[in-house]
Amino acid sequence: MPAVAGYAYLTQGVAAGQRAAALKAAPDVAAGVVVTDPDALDRAYEALADLVDDEIPEALVNAEVSERLNDLAMRLQAQGMDLDRLADFLRANFDDLAPHPEERDAERFAQRVRRGEVFGLIGLRRLARRAIEEGFPLEPEQRFGFLHLGGGRCLLWRNNLARVDPLSPEGRSAAYRLGRRRLHAAVAFYRRYLPGMERLQLLDTAPALGVRETRRILGDYRLTNADVLASRRFPDVVCRSAGHDSHLDLRDGVCDIPLGALLPQGVEHLLVAGRAIFAETPTAFDAIRGVVPCIGTGQAAGVVAALAAQARVAPRQLDIAAIQAELLRQGGIL
């Protein structure tokens, strides 16, 4: 049927001076398809309905939405830190910081800062209260923190941006606006109140919003909070959880991630990896959400898919011992 991509229609079929008005009237056009023949609209609706019915697996609907939708983050990079002056201030105000749990000594922490090592910190609540009392435009709930990357460069972040729904375009837009406003306010705050940061220069802001948790599948097995806290082992283990997360207090520091958490209920020939696997909030999800376990579940899903394709069977029909042997051969940790 005669149709054209929406962005192509805007650039080729709408005059430059009218494109803003066209987008305002029909914002979905930019990411959609324009059917150029009105008589073909009924056929277009039928084709889309058939596509939805035939091509989208049931498991994509068989999911749950996290209650922690608002755990959003935005980051920026900056440079221009005087590490000697910053180290002196942080040592003198160590009780106003919340550094890495393993870093408890103010003098040792200051030495790391002075040497330009990678370090991170959050806190500065006392300093922020002083700024607010002096009329500096900070929001009372705003928290501060940054990660020094080396060479006087740092990464600033803002978590828990707003009570918005990141699954909606309106919610994500609101989070982008709030995140950038707070990050720029943080840069101004550091320049004025944090010794050693007076010449801080903004390098860039993140091109995308960090959304930690939204939907996840309903899988064959749900990794529970109790599983993680007990460091439970599973016979169908395909990788291990993160070794450390500041949210957790694990007995052995890691737990198994079973294959069942990667397999959507009621659907064959489909595996899910990363933060969308079946894990309970908050503890189990915090144990599997990091980069390393996401890499592990991705590797496991790839291995299972490859072995299933070679054997011409569904993933559930594979011998778990064969899966684990291939993962170990590739250097996986089980």
Image (cartoon, rainbow, N blue to C red):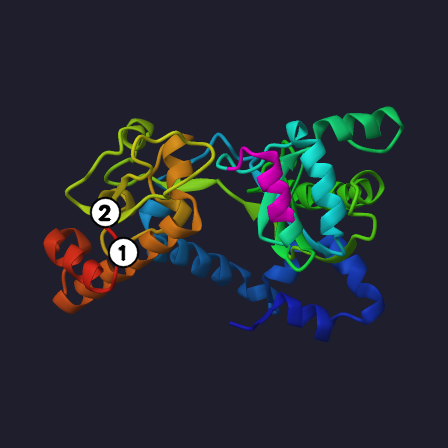
Q: Nearer the viewer, residue 247 or 238?
A: 247
Neighbour tally class for label 1: few under 14, some 14-19, many 20 plus, Cα within 10 Å? many
Distance in Å between CA atoms under marks 1 and 2: 8 Å
Residue 83 lies, with reference to residue 246, above or below; the image says below
Circle 1 — which element?
helix
Residue 128 at x, y percent in the picture: 76, 30
Task: Return the residue at label 1.
Answer: 300
Q: Residue at x 76, y 53 (%)?
A: 24
From the viewer's perspective, tell me whether residue 51 is left or right of residue 321.
right
Q: Nearer the viewer, residue 92 or 14?
A: 92
| Place of residue 214 in the rendered image (x, y in percent of width and height, measured from the top left) | 48, 40
Amino acid, disc 1: Ala
Q: Residues within 10 Å of mark 2 (few under 14, many from 20)?
A: many
Q: Is residue 236 left or right of residue 202?
A: left
User: Against 10, is 213 above or below?
Assistant: above
Say whether marks 1 and 2 touch (CB < 8 Å).
Answer: yes
Q: Position of residue 108 (x, y in %)?
A: 58, 41
* x, y percent for residue 225: 33, 29
* Residue bearing the label numbered 2: 259
Residue 321 visible within the image? yes
Q: Which mark is residue 78?
A: none
Kind of residue at disc 2: Leu
Please give the name of the residue rendered at 83% of the width and 48% of the height, measured from the top-left corner: 198
Residue projecting furthest to the bottom: 12
* Bounds of the magenta segment: 103-113
Residue 107 painted magenta = yes
Q: Residue furthest right?
A: 135
Element type where label 2 sits in the image: helix
Query: Which numbered disc flags the more N-terminal residue, 1 or 2?
Result: 2
**Is 168 placed left or right of 131 in the picture?**
left
In this orientation, does residue 169 appear? no
- At horizontal 55% and vertical 42% (from top left) the residue drawn is 167
